[in-house]
Amino acid sequence: MRADEVADVAVVGAGVAGLACALDCVAGGLRVRVLEASDAVGGRMRTDVVDGFRLDRGFQVFNTAYPQVRRRIDLRALRLRPFTPGFVLAGSRGRYRFADPTRRPDQAADLLPGRLAPLRDTVALGLFSARDMVLPAAVLRRGRDVPAERWLRDAGLSEVTVDQVLRPFLAGVFLEDGLETSSRMFHLVWRSMLRGSLCLPERGIGAVPEQLAERLPDGAVTLDARVSALTQDGVRLADGSAVPARAVVVATEAAAAARLLPGLLVPAQRTVTTFYHAAPASPLREPTLLVDSDRRLLNSVVLSEVVPGCSPDGRALVSTSVLGSGAQEAQVRARLAELYGAGTDGWECLAAYRIPGALPAMPAPHPLIRTSRHSPGRYVCGDHRATGSVQGAMASGTRAAREVLADMAASRL
Ligand SMILES: Cc1cc2nc3c(=O)[nH]c(=O)nc-3n(C[C@H](O)[C@H](O)[C@H](O)COP(=O)(O)OP(=O)(O)OC[C@H]3O[C@@H](n4cnc5c(N)ncnc54)[C@H](O)[C@@H]3O)c2cc1C
């Protein structure tokens, strides 16, 4: 469509929620314009190239089991590189491997009773993992919703296993270490980890939204177009120009959405910092997640073991995430020396991404679905309207498109 034509729908924000919404609206026969404030699509899923190194804007993993991923993404085109299933725990207790015995029985020795956890805990873990893997997601969505910590304790897990194994790992997933996240959300994520593979696209996480954007009609996405207000006839951009549209879907992060739609609920936000270092040699010759069991750092991974092409010059690329925004690089590097058991003096810090709104908080009880209908002709989607994940963001965009299409079909717009 031409820029001066009236769109059926203006989608504000080209993160994966907005892109999924736009794609479904186009598939439903609507004329769509996506307005993105930034200079590229992707929102929180973008990849920078710094001195030839590919750096995601904050470490994240891509899960192939998410239903929206299976529905929308051409996995082969992403050329995915997998992590070793499970993770390695390192810290004052020593080093242990938390493996998935169904996939890597050869690596599961540390799960034998008395090593990482007592027999009772191993049994409890096995039971709820089997249940999460086998039960339909719809059943898990209806399950009891309490803080994850309470659920794990009630399942019979000891304090030591919760505090020194699951809490450090899950802190890196939910970006909080109180284990206050909804137990329903925990089980859905646990299920997707058991059923899918954790991987990274060869060209970085930004390749995911880029793939979605490529499927939109030419000219549907306008970059550097910050929406400053919603109007009677569509939206107004920060440069003062108007974009007419019959309906508007606000697909920004929560705080930006509330500025455009006053009164909208804004959940608390989780903050994380990711440091990237170039190391002369790989400190761990394996594509695995290293979790700090003492919780001074969240986790670290030698990314060049996962995606060899992310480093341009043979040096190892190490990504390390820390909760909050206050971590100092020198302290992080000192801790990495302890965790990897390797000197880090010669490591070069390439970048540090401090991300205040990385994830919306999802404390129990957490509604997994919220309507996108806001007021006549106005809709809202994004991970803050579902769950803080790629799955949640895209599912929310899907729902918004469905509601727009239904309202237009019913001539309510
Ligand atoms: C460090 C980190 C790690 C993560 N790890 C994982 C993980 O391992 N697994 C997982 O599933 N999820 C993970 N996530 C979460 C996942 O990335 C997000 O849930 C998802 O990308 C959110 O998509 P969205 O479209 O809802 O929002 P966003 O990606 O935030 O998109 C919103 C878009 O709106 C644009 N915008 C804002 N205001 C305006 C305006 N006024 N006008 C026009 N455009 C505007 C923004 O520029 C942005 O492009 C992680 C996120 C971060 C940051």
Image (cartoon, rainbow, N blue to C red):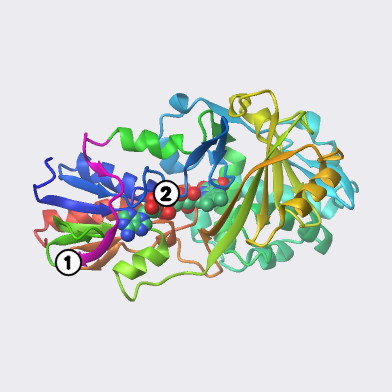
Residue 324's x, y, as percent? 64, 62
Residue 56 visible to an observer of this rendering: yes
Dividing the image into 4 quarters, which one contains the N terminus?
top left
Task: Please name whichever residue, 334 or 385, is drawn nearer the observer in this view of the structure.
Answer: 334
Element at label 2: loop
Label of residue 289 in the image: none
Using the image, tell me which numbered label, if any, was put on residue 43. 2
The amino acid type of the residue labelled 1 equals Thr
Mark 2 vs ligand 1: CB below 8 Å: yes
**Is 234 covered by the magenta stretch?**
no
Q: How many marks are shown on the rendered structure? A: 2
Instruction: Give the vertical position of 287 relative to 250 (above or below).
Output: above
- Say left or right for 268 vs 288: left
Look at the magenta stretch and give its main secondary structure.
Answer: loop
**For the view shown, which residue lies furthest in the bottom direction?**
263
- Asked which secondary structure carries label 1, the reply is strand
* Front position in the image: 155 or 103: 103
The magenta segment is 216-230
Mark 2 or mark 1, which is nearer the start of the sequence?
A: 2
Residue 229 painted magenta: yes
